[in-house]
Image (cartoon, rainbow, N blue to C red):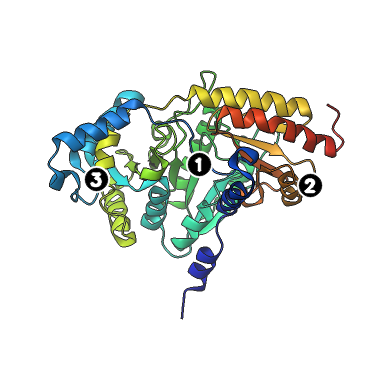
Amino acid sequence: MLSEKMYELGSRRSVIREIFEYAKKRSAEIGPENVFDFSLGNPNVPAPAKVEETIRGLLDTCDPVVLHGYTSAQGDFGVRDTIAKSINRRFGTRLTADSLYMTVGAAASLSICCRALTVPGDEFITFAPFFTEYRVFVEAAGADLVVIPVREKDFQIDLDEFEARIQEHTKGIIINSPNNPSGVVYSEDTIQAVCGILSRKEKEYGHPIYLIADEPYREIVYDGIKVPYLMNYYKNTLVCYSYSKALSLPGERIGYIAVSPDMEEERRVYAAVCGAGRALGYVCAPSLFQRVAAACVEETSDLSVYQRNRDLLYASLTEYGYECIRPDGAFYLFVKALEPDANAFYERAKKYELLLVPGDDFGCPGYVRIAYCVKTEQIINALPAFQKLAQEYGKNI
């Protein structure tokens, strides 16, 4: 007898991965230059030179047995200490090495946090649009995911709806800013209001309600936008971070969980994080890339490429008649489909070799996500296809 839930997850990829695999197949058939794949948030900008220099230096100077050997289960102490000091310097926090748990990317961070906090009957709240895998992580931990519908006028959080949906079994919320898939950065006013609601509800129900901040896109912001560091606004905060996006290391799977030192029963929560990492088999994140992350802790790839892509794509699509929220960060454009059914729109876009991700699984039917972390040349070459698609729907260009 198999787990039907695990069979379902394994036999059906996420919609993003399904489209990505279709893109590979189609590229083999007609050539990659003829396929406009905007499906996967896979950074196209190379990692900074310091990453390769660090790897070469470690290979040349470190004892291979140490370099490729196990670290402590929660990560090398020196690595965690370096990252904690960097966070403290940038955001005015009081983290120590023992506030951090090194992970195999943000997916592992989120999975560990959900598992560490959940008891039977718990719920987690998130806000549409949301990263599709949140539902998988939350349900695998034994909790239910409650989704607050999007406020379409600005894609900020509907605070009244949020407050109304918190109940006694709400264990926490997952908040993602800059947001995947919309690129929206939640304003400081929004964050302060959310944290105020959480604090009131904690007092009402007599137990902590945790804020899980999913932050792999923190550094990818435009036009001087500031991303509030949530640990400074709410004490019961866990920050999940990945070096996949801003440092362009998605395939190396390295990230961390930071547990606020001001959290209620902070040592017990940190121990639960360590225990969940153990139970899930997420101990000792990749040793080499722990050290690379520490050496490159405040480096980023050339993020100006993403701003250039955003500006080009947003200006062009709105000129063609598409409606979309202007992203302040990340590298996604969330576009209103030109018909109510985003899946039907996606199928019509495929005729022009445009591969866009329908928004239904993001909690926003009627939208599609465009990942513009691609070569600028691909966007330029795809613009005539976007224009023809708009004209097919009667848009006047």
Tell me the CA gap for discs 3 and 1: 29 Å
Vertical position of residue 128 compared to residue 275: above or below: above
| Residue with the mark numbered 1 | 175
Which amino acid lies under the numbered mark 2 shown in the image of this protein?
Pro
Q: Seen in the image, is 35 located left or right of residue 253?
A: right
Image coordinates of residue 390 in percent, x first then y, are 80, 35
On the image, which quarter does residue 335 sit in? Answer: top right
Q: Secondary structure at mark 3?
A: helix
Residues packed near mark 1 inside 10 Å, few (<14), some (14 to 19) or many (20 plus): many
Q: Depth-wise, is mark 2 or mark 1 nearer the camera? A: 2
Which amino acid lies under the numbered mark 3 shown in the image of this protein?
Ser
Image coordinates of residue 122 in percent, x first then y, are 47, 59
On the image, which quarter does residue 298 sit in? Answer: top left
Q: Which mark is drawn over residue 274? A: none
Image coordinates of residue 256 in percent, x first then y, are 33, 42
Residues packed near mark 3 inside 10 Å, few (<14), some (14 to 19) or many (20 plus): many
| Residue with the mark numbered 3 | 287
Q: Depth-wise, is mark 2 or mark 3 nearer the camera? A: 3
Q: Which mark is drawn over residue 340? A: 2
Q: Secondary structure at mark 2?
A: loop
Residue at 49% x, 34% y is: 44
Q: Are marks 3 and 1 in contact (CB under 8 Å)?
A: no
Residues packed near mark 2 inside 10 Å, few (<14), some (14 to 19) or many (20 plus): few
Q: Secondary structure at mark 1?
A: strand
Q: Seen in the image, is 233 located left or right of residue 27?
A: left
Q: Residue furthest bottom?
A: 1
Q: Depth-wise, is mark 3 or mark 1 nearer the camera? A: 3
Q: Seen in the image, is 325 located left or right of residue 71?
A: right
Residue 211 visible in the displayed image: yes
Which amino acid lies under the numbered mark 1 shown in the image of this protein?
Ile
